[in-house]
C-alpha cells in the first residue's frame, strides 16, 4: 500500500511539489493513504508536521494571501470536498523566482496535494458550492505573527480562474464576481493587505 507520485519544482519554482497519492478503488468505493511519512521520506521530502487544520468555505470565498513572518510554515494542502484554486507565491528574498506564483486546482476528484515550503504566501479561491480544505503545518500557528499580501496585486499578477472585475488599486472585493455572478467574498483583513513591494518594504 501507499506510494506517491511527486511532481517537483512546479512552474519552475524550486521546492513546490504536487503530490498524487495511490488510490485503490473498486465497485464499493476507494481507499488511499492521505499521508505517509515513510513515503514522503522515500521521496526525499523530509518534513515533520505538527498541526492539522480544516476549513469549510462557500463558493466565491477567497482566503489569502497569507504567511507567518517570524515562524514560517511548510504546508501540505488538499481538498476533501469540492474544488479550489490553490495559490503559492514565492517570498524567499534570495530566490530566483521571488514574486512568482503557481496555481493548482485541488479537488475531491483529483485528490492532489500541494506541498508549499517555508517562505511562500498562500491563498485559495473556492470554485464549487462548498469546499472543505485540509492542510498540515510543520510549525504551530502563531496568531500575532500573521502577514499577508493583496490577492490582486498586479505586481504578482495571479490569474484567478472565473473572477471577473477590474482592479481599482485596492484589494477590496467590491465589483468582483465569479463568472456565474457569485460575488467574491473576502474577510475584512484580506481586503486591507498591501502589495508585494510595499509589504516587503514595510517588513524589511
Image (cartoon, rainbow, N blue to C red):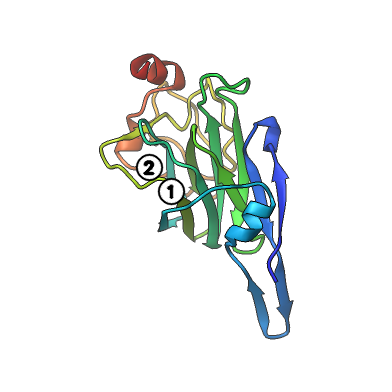
Task: Give x and y (percent) for residue 64.
Answer: 43, 39
Q: Residue at x 62, y 60 (%)?
A: 38
For residue 67, above or below residue 141: above
Q: Which residue is mark 2?
A: 186
- Gap in angstroms between the C-alphas marked 2 and 1: 6 Å
Task: Give x and y (percent) for residue 59.
Answer: 47, 54
Q: Residue at x 52, y 25 (%)?
A: 92
| Quarter of the image with the N terminus in it | bottom right
Q: Residues within 10 Å of mark 1 (few under 14, many from 20)?
A: many
Task: Give x and y (percent) for residue 197.
Answer: 44, 16
Q: Residue at x 30, y 35 (%)?
A: 145
Q: Is residue 189 visible?
A: yes
Task: Give x and y (percent) for residue 46.
Answer: 58, 47
| Quarter of the image with the C terminus in it | top left
The reply to whether callout 2 and callout 1 are in contact (CB within 8 Å) is: yes
Q: Is residue 69 left or right of residue 5?
A: left
- Which mark is first along the chain, 1 or 2? 1
Q: Which residue is mark 1?
A: 61
Amino acid at each position: 500500500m501507499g506510494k506517491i507520485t511527486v511532481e517537483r519544482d512546479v512552474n519552475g519554482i524550486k521546492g513546490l511539489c504536487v503530490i498524487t497519492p495511490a488510490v485503490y478503488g473498486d465497485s464499493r468505493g476507494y481507499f488511499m493513504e492521505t499521508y505517509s511519512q515513510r513515503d514522503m521520506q522515500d521521496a526525499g521530502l523530509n518534513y515533520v508536521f505538527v498541526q492539522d487544520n480544516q476549513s469549510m468555505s462557500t463558493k466565491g470565498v477567497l482566503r489569502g494571501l497569507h504567511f507567518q513572518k517570524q515562524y514560517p510554515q511548510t504546508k501540505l494542502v488538499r481538498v476533501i470536498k469540492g474544488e479550489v484554486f490553490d495559490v503559492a507565491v514565492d517570498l524567499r528574498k534570495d530566490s530566483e523566482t521571488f514574486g512568482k506564483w503557481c496555481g493548482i486546482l485541488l479537488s475531491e476528484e483529483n485528490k492532489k496535494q500541494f506541498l508549499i515550503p517555508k517562505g511562500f504566501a498562500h491563498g485559495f479561491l473556492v470554485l464549487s458550492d462548498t469546499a472543505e480544505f485540509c492542510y498540515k503545518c510543520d510549525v504551530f500557528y502563531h496568531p500575532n505573527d500573521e502577514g499577508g499580501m493583496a490577492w490582486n496585486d498586479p505586481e504578482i499578477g495571479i490569474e484567478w480562474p472565473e473572477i471577473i472585475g477590474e482592479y481599482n488599486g485596492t484589494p477590496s472585493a467590491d465589483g468582483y464576481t465569479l463568472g456565474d455572478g457569485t460575488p467574491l467574498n473576502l474577510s475584512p483583513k484580506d481586503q486591507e493587505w498591501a502589495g508585494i513591494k510595499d509589504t516587503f518594504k514595510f517588513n524589511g
